[in-house]
Image (tube, rainbow, N blue to C red):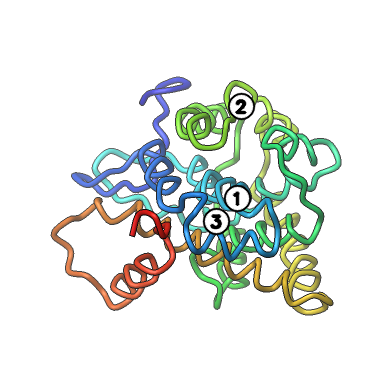
Amino acid sequence: MLVNKGYTVYAYYNPPYVQTMEEHVELALQVFSEEAPLVRLGRSITSAFHKLLGLGLLLHDFGKALFEPSRGKELSFTGHEIVSGWMTYRLLESFEVGGKIQRKLGMSTGPLENGALVLAVLLHHHPMDFTSRLENFRRLKPKLTRDRVKAFAQSVAGPATKHLGLSAELEELFLEALGAEEIEIAKIYSTTKEVYENQWRKVWLFVKSPAIRRLFLLLLQGIVAADYRASRTRKSSTPQSRFARAVEIFLGHYSHSERAS
């Protein structure tokens, strides 16, 4: 789908194999129903679990809007999860915007639940090496502009409406969270570095309730697994890796409701 001066936001770009963001997010949001075992586990911690997971899946690749492909060349999307985590934090916790998207989704979450989702989005690719990826991201040149944010909002409008009940207000919320005509990488880097350090302490290191740690892990596993499932059609001839087999086993246990199994 072409939007905003011809921008197409891609989830994967390595011609001839490409996947638009709209297709990727739609497939990801299909993975876990409200009665899926993973969701039922999450609801034992917070009634908002399914909506938190859905929001995480909507936003997990937001940072790919930063990157514009060159015709015929593979696009690596280096550090995109950092921008995704930054936007997740802005939407959930920033002074200007925080609380609005929760009201739109009809969920009530506090700083710890929000922090668990922010961490899950930040760490859904490389949880063991995040700080070095953050430093590599710092060297990137592109800026996050309003046009790019609009392009992402329009590309996920269909899945957001269908699965989360978010419609026209989504673009408005994204732009309000952006907070300017454009944001430099240095600003996203410095904010995200601070957010990561603070949320890691609150959600993992010093949290009094182990339930918040479990919430973070369930959200992280859900995003990783749904992201993989939504990506598997990109190269149907690619041999299945051990990781891929592990994800499929996980999904076999946790992505289907008892009624469907």
Q: Which amino acid, by three-letter code, is at mark 2? A: Glu
Q: In the image, what residue occupies the spot 50% across and 40% down? A: 65
Please give left or right for residue 54 compared with residue 27 in the image. Answer: right
List x then y, in percent, for residue 159: 46, 34
- Nearest-to-viewer mark from 1 and 2: 2
Q: In the image, what residue occupies the spot 42% across and 36% down? A: 9
User: Is label 3 in a helix, a strand or a loop?
Assistant: helix
User: Is label 2 in a helix, a strand or a loop?
Assistant: helix
Q: CA distance from mark 3 to mark 1?
A: 5 Å
Q: Which amino acid, by three-letter code, is at mark 3? A: Glu
User: Is label 1 in a helix, a strand or a loop?
Assistant: helix
Closer to the N terminus: mark 2 or mark 3?
Answer: 3
Q: Quadrant of residue 115?
A: bottom right
Q: In the image, what residue occupies the spot 18% across and 44% down? A: 16
Category of crowding for the residue at label 1, using alpha-carbon neighbours closer than 10 angstroms: few (below 14), some (14–19), many (at least 20)? many
Category of crowding for the residue at label 2, using alpha-carbon neighbours closer than 10 angstroms: few (below 14), some (14–19), many (at least 20)? many
Closer to the N terminus: mark 1 or mark 2?
Answer: 1
Q: Which amino acid, by three-letter code, is at mark 1? A: Val
Q: Report which residue position mark 3 lands on.
A: 81
Q: Disc 3 vs disc 1: Cβ atoms closer than 8 Å?
A: yes
User: Camera-side residue: 253 or 131?
Assistant: 253
* Position above or below: 97 against 189: above
List x then y, in percent, for residue 71: 27, 38
Marker disc for residue 171: 2
User: Camera-side residue: 221 or 125?
Assistant: 221
- Nearest-to-viewer mark from 2 and 3: 2
Q: In the image, what residue occupies the spot 50% across and 37% down? A: 163
Q: CA distance from mark 2 to mark 3?
A: 20 Å
Marker disc for residue 83: 1
Say which quadrant the C terminus sits in.
bottom left
